[in-house]
């Protein structure tokens, strides 16, 4: 995390049920109804999880300085598992092209397999990780609040914090072998994600990303 505490991507380990009935009964009921719907949709995908537990609980917060760092970590993971040279990606002035990297695009479109699905195929700027083990992120399309709401705002992804932890352990070893320096931003990004996954699993609570 930067010295000024500013982050572009925030993470929280705690309950997805954020509203207490004594605070706002109407919001509480609306959130409860939404969580029940999400639970049912996840159950249809084979994931059984209690999203109504421990309302209002928040036990850990962290942040990633730049979206760029997360996207770069994903790209490096994809390159390493496919035996590609990551030296250009580690340069301090590395910038992404306007078009997505072809390898990442192939993974997103299921044209290329990956051993890092919960890192690479999860929503980029939001979503959740659940303390349940399942193979790949699950994307759920919600009904937009109104007809003018952009479609990307009505889709949310749910990854597995157990799967994410496993992937990050593997990736950390690969970064070691590749000689990625401890002070590189992708190392800090991995460390934050790993801590979030560890806390999520230890306390049986989701990771919330925004």
Image: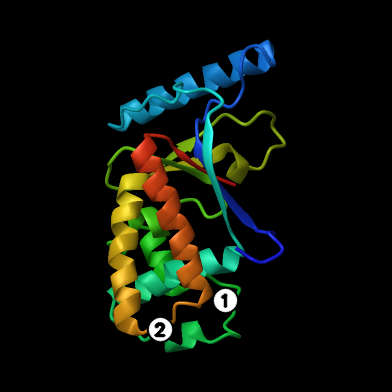
Residue 19 place in picture, x, y as percent:
62, 22
Residue 201: numbered disc: none
Instruction: Look at the image and name its color scheme.
Output: rainbow
Left or right of 174 in this view: 187: right
Using a 10 Å C-alpha cutoff, classify the residue at mark 2 as few (fewer than 14 neighbours), some (14 to 19) or many (20 or more).
some
Q: What residue is drawn where x is 46% and y is 71%? A: 187
Task: Place residue 200 in its image quadrant.
Answer: top left
Disc 1/disc 2 C-alpha distance (Å): 13 Å
Q: Are marks 1 and 2 in contact (CB under 8 Å)?
A: no
Q: Quadrant of residue 194?
A: bottom left
Callout 2 secondary element: loop
Q: Which residue is mark 1?
A: 96
Percent x, y of residue 76:
41, 74
Q: Nearer the viewer, residue 19 or 183?
A: 183
With 44 as the anchor, is 67 left or right in this view? right
Count the marks. Answer: 2
Residue 61 visible within the image: yes
Label 1 Cα crowd, 10 Å radius (few <14 / some 14-19 / many 20+): few
Where residue 131 appears, x then y in whole percent?
35, 38
- Residue depicted at x 52% and y 30%: 16
Q: Nearer the viewer, residue 135 or 13?
A: 13
Quadrant of residue 171 within the rendered picture: bottom left
Q: In this image, 186 relative to 137: left or right?
A: right
x 46%, y 21%: residue:
52
Q: Is residue 114 visible?
A: no
Where 43 sits versus 202, above or below? above
Against 151, is 8 above or below? Answer: below
- Given residues 76 and 156, the one toward you in this image is 76
The residue wearing badge 2 is 86
Query: Which part of the image, by quadrant, shows the N terminus?
Result: bottom right
* Mark positioned earlier in the residue sequence (1 or 2): 2
């Amino acid at each position: 995390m930067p010295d000024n505490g500013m982050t572009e991507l925030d993470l929280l380990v705690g309950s997805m049920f954020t509203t207490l009935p004594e605070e706002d009964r109407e919001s509480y009921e609306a959130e409860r109804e939404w969580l029940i719907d999400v639970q049912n949709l996840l159950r249809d995908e084979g994931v059984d999880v209690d999203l109504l537990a421990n309302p209002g609980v928040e036990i850990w917060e962290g942040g990633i300085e730049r979206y760029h760092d997360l996207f770069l970590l994903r790209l490096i993971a994809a390159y390493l598992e496919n035996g590609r040279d990551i030296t250009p990606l580690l340069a301090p002035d590395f910038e992404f092209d306007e078009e997505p990297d072809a390898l990442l695009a192939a993974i997103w479109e299921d044209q290329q397999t990956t051993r890092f699905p919960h890192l690479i195929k999860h929503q980029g700027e939001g979503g959740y990780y659940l303390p349940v083990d399942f193979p790949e992120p699950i994307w759920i399309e919600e009904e937009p609040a109104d007809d003018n709401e952009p479609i990307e705002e009505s889709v949310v992804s749910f990854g597995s914090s157990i799967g994410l932890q496993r992937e990050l352990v593997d990736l950390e070893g690969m970064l070691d072998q590749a000689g990625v320096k401890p002070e590189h931003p992708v190392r800090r990004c991995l460390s934050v994600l790993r801590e979030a996954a560890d806390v999520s699993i230890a306390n049986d609570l989701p990771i919330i990303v925004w």
